[in-house]
Image (spheres, coloured by chain):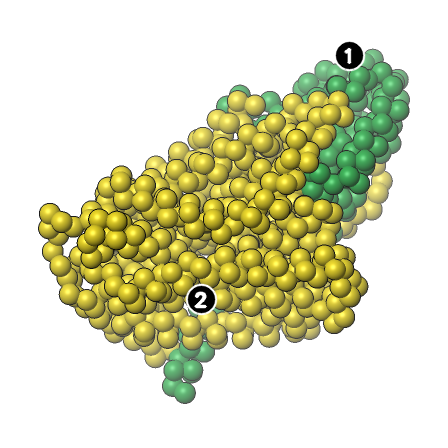
Chain colours: A green, B yellow
Amino acid sequence: MKNIISIIKFTVLIVILFAVIYPLTILAIAQFAPNQGKGETISVNGKVVGYQKIGQKFDKVNYFWGRPSAVDYNAAGSAGSNKGPSNADYLAQVQKRIDTFLVVHPYLKKSEIPADMVTASGSGLDPNISPQGALIQVKRVADARKLPEEKVKQLVEKMSNKPKVMGTETVNVLELNIALDQLK
Amino acid sequence: MNTEIFGVVTVFLLTIVLAIPVGKYIAKVYLGDKTFLDPIFNPIERFIFKISGINDKEEMNWKQHLKALLSVNLGWFILCFFVLIFQGNLPLNPDGNPSMSPDLAFNTAISFVVNCNLQHYSGESGLSYLGQLMLMFLQFVSAGVGMAAAAMVFNAMKERTTEHLGNFYNYFIKSCTRVLLPLSAIVAVVLIFSGTPMTFEGKDQITTLQGDSVEVSRGPAAAFIGIKHVGTNGGGFFGVNSAHPLENPTYLTNAVELWAQLIVPFAMIFALGFFLKKRKLSYVVFGVMTIGFLLLVIPTMTSELNGNPAIERMGIAQTTGAMEGKEVRFGPAISGFWSIATTVISTGSVNSMHDSSMPISGSMQLLSMMVNAFYGGCGVGWLNFYIFIILAVFISGLMVGRTPEFLGKKIEAREVKIAAFIAILHPLLILSGTALASYFAANDTPMGYWFSGNATGWLNNPGNHGFSEMLYEFTSSSANNGSGFEGLGDNNPFWNITTGIVLLLGRFLPIIGPLAIAGLLASKKYIPESAGTLKTDTTIFGIMVFAVIAIIAALSFFPALALGPLAEYFTIK
């Protein structure tokens, strides 16, 4: 009995240490972080249009599109497709995505489409695409906006993040589209 | 491409270099030497032990260690179980998430107590913030328990004859406050300033640039993710774990999270050398583990970088490798590396969806968990490896015709029986669980209470890959890993209860076994080294241990791997 009471008291005290004091300390430090640790948002004309790190759904012709998502970019949840590489239904779905992509971008050769544009991301909220994924959309977006193709292409180059030492090449689709809206 | 490979190599080498001083520090902590955090934590610990009436100075034998270890774990399980089944009505629930069903709470509580974090729920909708904090508490203490058990085994390996093997509570609290807490805090701070949320506010409602209305889940994530990795727990705050852009926002945070999960398992091996003043032994152990790790990691990264052959045939550009289930900011190289790191060391956090990995990667991930002794989880990795050492000593002893000895202690029938039992337990749990589930799936059995609908309904993929999903789930449970082929529909009584039982057996028996062996050996007479002693800190002995591991893992698991990922490999090749 004495042992049981000891263990209960011990547990209560270490719960206070690890599940109260520790997170409160981190919370206090978070007050110095961007947006007080509530997540970095992006605003346009004073209105919040999204979180910098969270991908958004774009399906209108005058915007750059992101990757396929298993949760349709609703960040209330998150999920990948969890489809195995040999799954016939899944492979048919990828084939369909390629075909659809070619219908909307008739000027493209199949071999120009990078894999990230036709495969679902791990989180369903991937904010990025590869620079190649953005470049192949330039003509469509420029035509829809009646902008010179070269100007849109320059914007993509400017917004592409190409690390010199470590990492992968990325473009943040939301930031690219915001910059696109401001392009005159 | 080269920037990706360079990223992997840098993270790996930097972790090894840093693990040596951290290992030295951990050895000092367990030896009771002065360390820089003493002024802060000594008074706190004295207060905790005084109020709870626990004597942290009393020397314990191995049975007392075990009794203390099991009783605190039981207490934590009960507490957590009740928080989870009532969380819907308790405070800190801004999103109004529901309470857990009893079978899910059973699985979740066990899974976090045993350092596995299998997670048959999604964090965004399945837990209140109180539930998250409770699980975060378990992430600290479950890692602390593993390290305390390893510390007792270190102590038992000293060259002397004794029953006194230190104090469980002392080892436990020191592991938590001197190692896990400061490292977690460092990781949490890096995450906060990289964009991970740390707030108690609920979901945010926003209108996107294009005009859609969506919600964004938030929460006290940064603190949670720190200990999730440092304690090799791996339970994600959000559903998709470290693939989530808020849980792992950048390439840098990805590197830090990788470092965080590798550092303690690496450092524990070096700590062994500093603790016993047998640094050569720890280099041999670390060498064997590293060779095993590289043999698993290289094929995985290669197959991910090469991409899916079935998609290659469609004629698109797979220059960025296999991208299904992966995030663009990480890419296939470091995602493949992570998938092996997380499976060899029993973290089980993921930054890509393992279910969509290439077949070779899937088999390497499975094999990592089947071996479960290359680096391994906080503390328990060393315990698993210890079993293989005992077996290797025994077999080498027989080969040269001498009584097997390990560090001056005779290994006799009793110790070998325990070691053999523990070595067989892991395949037994995995293969019988998988056999049971596959039997139901093969016959498409109506499952009644156990699962709504017929058994094939829990599979997300047909054929060999479906078999791999079930094999992976039991392997992950028995190895206390916690990652999954997440397509599997696992939140139902069948999977919650069967894996819950496997988790318990797969955690506590492999702790009890090594503790018992170490305790028994410690009380035996010490025989000083002579010309006829089998030296255990040599390359030859390292090869011997590696051979024992390879034979046990390969022979037990090869048929199952052949039915799952290897068969899949040949279908899409």
3D distance between C-alphas at marks 1 and 2: 64 Å
Residue situated in front as seen by the camera: B228 or B96: B228
Residue B147 image-quadrant placement: bottom left
User: Badge 2 sits on which subunit?
Assistant: B
Q: Residue at x 64, y 26 (%)?
A: B320
Q: Nearer the viewer, mark 1 or mark 2?
A: 2
Provide the chain ID for the residue under circle 1: A
Q: For mark 1, what is the residue?
A: A150
Q: Secondary structure at mark 1?
A: helix
Kind of residue at disc 1: Glu
Q: Position of residue B345 (x, y in %)?
A: 46, 49
Residue at point 23%, 45% (across, down)? B537
Name the one closer to the observer, A7 or A156. A7
Q: Nearer the viewer, residue B204 or B412?
A: B412
- B321 relative position to B164: left or right: right
Q: Which residue is mark 2?
A: B508
Question: Is B421 drawn above or below residue A131 in the view shown?
Answer: below
Where residue B477 sits, quadrant-wise, is bottom right
Residue at 34% over, 50% down: B268
Residue closer to the observer: B414 or B207: B414
Q: Secondary structure at mark 2?
A: helix
- Quarter of the image where the N terminus of chain A is located: bottom left
Q: Residue at x 33, y 71 (%)?
A: B65
